Each structure stands twice: as structure tokens, then as C-alpha cells.
Amino acid sequence: MTTRSLHLSDELHSYLVAHSTPLDAIARDLMEETRTELPDDVKMQIGPEQAGFLTMITRLIGARRAVEVGTFTGMSSLAIARGLPDDGSLTCFDISPRFTAVAQRYWQRAGVADRIRLVLGPAAENLRTLPSEPHLDLAFIDADKEGYLTYWHELVPRMRQGGLILVDNVLWSGRVADPSTDDPVTATIRRFNQEVLADDRVEVVMLPIGDGLTLARRR
């Protein structure tokens, strides 16, 4: 027994996925299309356990108003939208018409397109068009790492008390804890993680899900 989170081998990850509620045919098709049609970019897609976690956490907090920064081909937005009530809303910010065209097809197929609004363009600028008062229940950040702090500071004031912000890739394949690694992206993620930890507007737990997932609750 250990008190530490486990490093998942391929076999243990497969076991974990096999013992969670499985993805349905729509999500499986989306994952497969992304893998086969966009092999050079597939690493940007969240894994099946992350998708299940996003749907469950959305439902658990009763989220009605959600925001996503970084949509790619739509796995995370599909997961969040499925956790929303019928009158819930998810606003997705992305810069790629090509990738999000795939997402839109799957939103339609899953019957959740009516609760998703896609906004194309620079996310930092477009986030500023949201109402400034605290109104968001859930936010998910999974975009360019250089923009993480900007997105964070735009979103935190807009989260209602008890609202959740989830941030992907905060462990960066373990490089954040490797003192011999000092490339600019790793340094940026380290700085982001430190600023989030020091932000007294939130309470934070970092989870070893996927490539590391920060879960922050607005105080």
C-alpha cells in the first residue's frame, strides 16, 4: 500500500478505463476519428477517464453555466455539455475552424448542440466580453500554455462562490518536477501552478488524472 498516487502503466490505465462507465458510441467515434484523421494533433484530446470525470463533476455541482477555453475536436465540450441540464449553456473559446468543425458535427450527433455556443478568435479578448460579475459554475482550461495565466485571471472573478475551474496539463508529463528541464513551456506551467497555489480566491487540489488536472474551487 502507498499514500502516493500511482504512475499508471499502459496495463493499469486500460484496467482503469475498463472499470469506469464506458464511453458511448458517439464519444468513441470522435476519439477514433481524431486519432486517425489528426494523428499529429491527437495528443491534444483528453482521455476517456478525463471525459467521464468532466461529465460527473458537471453533474455533481449542478452546473448550468460553463465555459471552455480550448475545444480542439470536442471531446471535453461534449463531456461537459452532457453533464448540463437541458437549459444549461456552455461557451467554447477556440481559434481553429478546422478542429472545431469536427466538434460541431459530434455536438449535433449527440443532441447537445443547442446548449453550446462556439466563439472563434483570441480567447483572452473574447473572455472579456463575458459578464464581469460572478456567474459561472464551471470552467475548463486546456489551450495554449502561454495563455493560461491570462485565462485564469479572466475567469476567476467570473466564477460564482463554489464554482470550479479545471485546468489540464499541469504536470506536463512530469517535466514540471524535473529540475533538469528548463524549456519555456515547462517554465510557464511551473509559474502558473505557483500563482494558482498562491491565489487566495480559490482552494486548490492537483489531481494525477491524464497529464495532471488542477481542480480549483472559488471561495
Image (cartoon, rainbow, N blue to C red):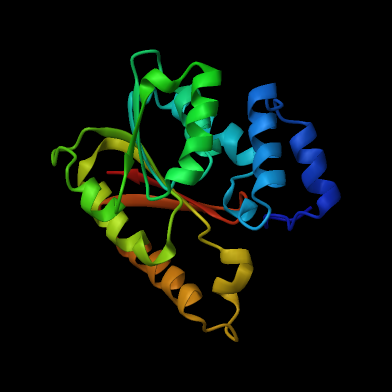
- Point out the residue furthest to the bottom here: 180
Between 79 and 104, the residue placed more toward the observer is 104
Residue at 58% from the left image edge and 36% from the top image edge: 51
Res. 211 image quadrant: bottom right
Between 7 and 17, the residue placed more toward the observer is 17
Residue 188 position in % (x across, y down): 42, 72
Residue at 76% from the left image edge and 39% from the top image edge: 16
Q: Is residue 198 above or below residue 205?
A: below
Q: Is residue 133 above or below residue 11?
A: above
Residue at 60% from the left image edge and 79% from the top image edge: 178
Residue 164 position in % (x across, y down): 37, 40
Residue 183 position in % (x across, y down): 51, 81
Between 195 and 55, the residue placed more toward the observer is 55
Between 201 and 192, the residue placed more toward the observer is 192
Left/right placement of residue 45 relative to residue 158 reads: right
Q: Is residue 4 above or below residue 94?
A: below
Residue 145 position in % (x across, y down): 43, 63
